[in-house]
Image (cartoon, coloured by chain):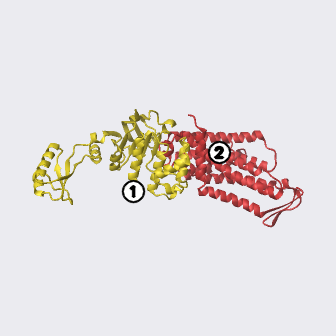
Chain colours: A yellow, B red
Amino acid sequence: MLAIEAKGLTKRYTGAFGRNAQDALRGLDLAIPRGAAFGLIGPNGAGKTTFVKALLGVVHPTAGEVRLLGGAPSDPRIRARVGYLPERLRLPPAWTPLEILESVSRLKGLRPRTADLLALVEDVGLAEAARRRTGGFSKGMKQRLGLAVALLGEPDLLVLDEPTDGLDPLGRVHVRSLLARALARGATLLLNSHLLAETERVCGRIGVLVKGRIVREGPLEALAPPPAAWRVRFEPGADGAALQAAGFTNGVAGAETTYRFAGPDAAALNAALDRARAAGALLAELSPEGTDLEAVYAQAVKA
Amino acid sequence: MTSSPGNVLAVARDLLREARARRWTLALLAGVTALLLLAAFGLELEVVDGALAASRFFGRPSHGGITAADVALRPLFEAVAYMVFYGGTLFGVLACADFAPALLAPGRIEHLLSLPVRRAELVLGTFLGVELLVLAGAVYGGLGLALIVAAKTGVFGWAPVAAAALGAVGFTGVYAVMMAAAMVARSAALSAAAGAVVWVAGIVAGNRAAIAPLFEPGLARAVFLALTAPLPRLSELGRHAARVANGLPLDPAQLAVQAGGTALFAAAALAVALALFERKDF
């Protein structure tokens, strides 16, 4: 069962009289299974926001087809099952969070009790501001409120555009826990973010969008290139000359006990570690370099 | 495409709730209240056995001789009818120019379109909300004045209320064009300008029979008559309001034609607004 399915999705923006045509999406194909946490990444102008808007019927595709939760985005019954947080959500400044949630509830055909709405406001960390006008909210508070709006009614599909933008580190942790809870109940997540570390932490599947096309797609571990090097930290007291003789280079500035081992070869690494241990060094930490989302992104964009 | 009345009403309700905090709405409320207070405290009417013996405005005599109160008050009601009709519709143009552009603001429209609301429901709900706002403002002023005069004279006249209702009918055509303009370009200034043009053109159209002879017979006159033919007859509706105020009999058929024509014009302009909105990407 697919939560999102796009086939040959194309969007061409044209100016007056058909001039200055720009292709935002060029035959994009994508299938996101239900229950997945999917991160969409790509450079500026790659078409990420246009894709999200096409999903929700905010822009009309020039060609191709898109289906959400098995139906067309134009069907209000389908959109009722979607929670969306736009990148720059603008809400009436004179309204309070409770009033905003009441309004969205009405438009979604929900009839929640005030206590439920208050619980949701509390969930996103706005309990003390539940009855304050949103006009005076900080960017982070608006973002939290937008997230509450998206989570209202426990939607089957969450489409979030930069959900942690403007949030402090603890706020980001909090948002991740909210998203984890939504995923645990079976919701599908489409996360569009420039923050690769956030995307990596939340999403199990990644799609890299470049010039209107998905150029890489799949689980992060399958997309990641082999490590370019290994970073190895030894317990203090290890003999530096012996470690260098074992094949490690002392190339990490400011971290005297941290060394690098060049190349992806695991067998060569293990042999070098055996030599280091034989010289009395104790391994404290080992991590690959160049296998994170940043590496996937860089490789996909350069290709 | 079918629309849910529930969603249209929900959008209209949200608009009214949003309007509460807008300075233009507060200005409308304050202005109407100030006029009512002026009438309540400044207008002295002496009624003896159902006849108006004297009237003073802030102590200055404005009426002498003994006349039946309802007859004596007709000029006042007529003036109020015109003021409510033209003042109300023009103020409505200014006060409501920002509603549609605000609805289409980036960050807001994407969110609204992602909800299970059809585009037609957003357009109709916004239109209905603005109409209700204008009607409420006009009825507040009209009914308030009628009640003040009734308290002072014992004569209750529906004229100000009727003028308010006719003003709201006339405003349908004006606001529908304002919405269509907002769909072309998201600008409160453009929306207000479009409303002002229709307001003036509606006054001209209501007097087209009198103005047409000023054009040379032939092409110029034909063009003038053709251009003004589809426009709402705002000044005709205003005259109907004044006739009600003056206690003169109304021509129901004529009134139905004017009101129906205005509604038809509004429906056509709304259809254009909706067609533009349906095709628009945000």
Question: What is the CA distance from the residue labelled 2 to the residue labelled 1?
Answer: 48 Å
Label 1 residue SS: loop
Amino acid type, label 1? Asp
Which image quarter: residue A208?
Answer: top left
Q: Which residue is mark 2?
A: B172
Q: Chain of mark 2?
A: B
Q: Nearer the viewer, residue B51 or A2?
A: A2
Left or right of residue B200, residue B63 in this image? right
Amino acid type, label 2? Thr
| Residue B235 appears in the rendering | no
Q: Chain of mark 1?
A: A
Locate the N terminus of chain B by quadrant: top right
Q: Nearer the viewer, residue B265 or A84?
A: A84
Q: Are marks 2 and 1 on the same chain?
A: no
Q: Are marks 2 and 1 in contact (CB under 8 Å)?
A: no
Left or right of residue B126, residue B61 in this image? right
Q: Residues within 10 Å of mark 2 (few under 14, many from 20)?
A: many
Q: Which mark is residue A139?
A: none
**In the displayed structure, would residue B181 be above or below residue B152?**
above
Q: Nearer the viewer, residue A18 or A163?
A: A163
* Foreground label between 2 and 1: 1
Q: Which residue is mark 1?
A: A168
Q: Position of residue A22 (x, y in %)?
A: 39, 42
Which image quarter: residue A183?
Answer: top left
Label 2 residue SS: helix
Q: Position of residue A171 (x, y in %)?
A: 40, 54
Which image quarter: residue A256?
Answer: bottom left
Left or right of residue A241, residue B81 in this image? right
| Residue A109 appears in the rendering | yes
Q: Residues within 10 Å of mark 1 (few under 14, many from 20)?
A: few
Left or right of residue A100, residue A265 in this image? left
Count of all numbered marks drawn on residues in the image? 2
